[in-house]
Amino acid sequence: MPPAFPSLSAARPEADADPWVLSQGGSEEGQVIRFLDRLLWYAHRMRASDLHFEPYEDVYRIRMRVDGQLREVSRPPLAVKDRIASRIKVLAKLDISEKRLPQDGRMRHTVATQQTADFRVSTLPTLFGEKVVLRLLDAGPAHLDLDALGYEDAQKAALLEAIYRPWGMVLVTGPTGSGKTLSLYSALRVLNGTGLNISTAEDPSEINLPGVNQVNVNEKAGLSFAVALRAFLRQDPDVVMIGEIRDLETADMALKAAQTGHLVLSTLHTNDAPSSLARLRHMGVAAHNIAASVGLVTAQRLVRRLCPACRQPSELHPAVLLNAGFKSEALDGSWTPYRAVGCADCHQGYLGRIGVFQVMPVSQAMQEIILQECSSAEMARQAAREGVLSLREAGLRKVKLGLTSVEEIIDQTNA
């Protein structure tokens, strides 16, 4: 049985209120339109990041990702799966007759009175029909705030110092869904002004930033990250953001741009900050280019925030806290770990998410280690000697502040 779903006037789900059932009455087309309106409203209300429309042989289910967790919200009849997919494709201006190939698009939809939301749309042909995934894009300027992301004061100061330099590279690393794009946009918002020419190449652009020249890469048309970067360098740039460094050509060009008077921001997919430097070397980038170009690397994870309304003190044995990474001197009774409980205001005891960061400036000593082509483990030891927090250590600080649980930090920072 699908979980409860709210009425249009409710803040929380009502019992046995499947959105498809609530949409009954009238023509099937009208039911589909009302159903999607209700579903998108609810996703926005619940601050979901994604909606999955999944056709299988005997069931059609819809799941929603809230605070990183997928949950089922509805099971419409199998017979309407094509109508729902077509309705979404019409809104996203996709080809409704093309069901054999994946398609990507974007749509804007009214989710509340005088309020719209942007959605990125991806379709995928599967054995039993088209799977559709909607990514909710929150472009509100209030969300592009470095202060709200979760950086420690010293970490934020190091990041600001790096992005205020006139040249060099700042790398953001972490797995998919860890908030890298939001961090980059927040940094660009700090820099965005009439005195700088800022250009970005993204796949695709997720947030519209007025005053920034944003380009969507299109590999099929020959517009790759490397091609876009080459074009940017002929446009008198001050700041360049490359959505992701995927290959040696892009990495080489980005690093050379960082050495020739440009600030370059980009992302990599690695576990932590030291691994990013090793990853560039494994791509084939010369060690001296890495040492001369990269000014700072930040790794991040998103962890769920404990609900302040229902969190309760956790009776954890000191051995558990020590195994999690706390130092014995930290167990002095001056703070209390909390655990998730769950109430009508939250999701399984959590409400929203906050970033956990490892911010590693590339010091002169780190440059020497890079030039010696040492391992990422040696880079990590040097970072620790310089006082750089690991992701686990940064997460445990959030535990001491009562923002999240020990269990959540262990789950999200296990390499």
Image (cartoon, rainbow, N blue to C red):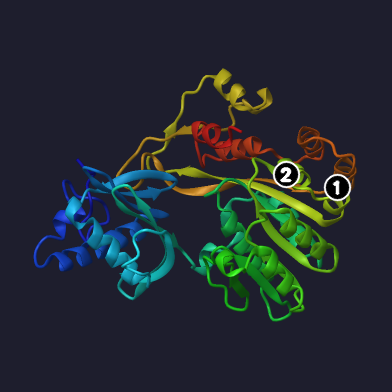
Q: Return the residue nearer the eye: 66 or 119.
A: 119
Q: Going 59% across and 67% down the picture, which residue do you hit?
A: 217
| The label number, if any, that marks residue 209 in the structure image | none
Q: Secondary structure at mark 1?
A: helix
Q: Secondary structure at mark 2?
A: helix
Q: Position of residue 103 (x, y in %)?
A: 42, 62
Q: Position of residue 81 (x, y in %)?
A: 24, 56
Q: Amino acid at mark 1?
A: Ala
| The label number, if any, that marks residue 287 in the structure image | 1
Q: Is residue 9 left or right of residue 398?
A: left
Q: On the image, which quarter does residue 377 sit in? A: top right
Q: Is residue 106 left or right of residue 9?
A: right
Q: Is residue 211 left or right of residue 140?
A: right
Q: Is residue 157 in view from this perspective?
A: no
Residue 390 position (above or below residue 207): above
Q: Going 55% across and 31% down the picture, which residue do you hit?
A: 410
Disc 2 to disc 1, C-alpha distance? 11 Å
Q: Residues within 10 Å of mark 1 (few under 14, many from 20)?
A: many
Identify the residue position indicated by label 2 in the image: 279
The quarter of the rendered structure image containing the C terminus is top right
Q: Return the residue nearer the eye: 130 or 395.
A: 130
Q: Is residue 221 in view from this perspective?
A: yes
N-terminal of the pair, mark 2 or mark 1, is 2
- Residue extending farthest to the bottom is 194
Q: Position of residue 183 (x, y in %)?
A: 61, 57
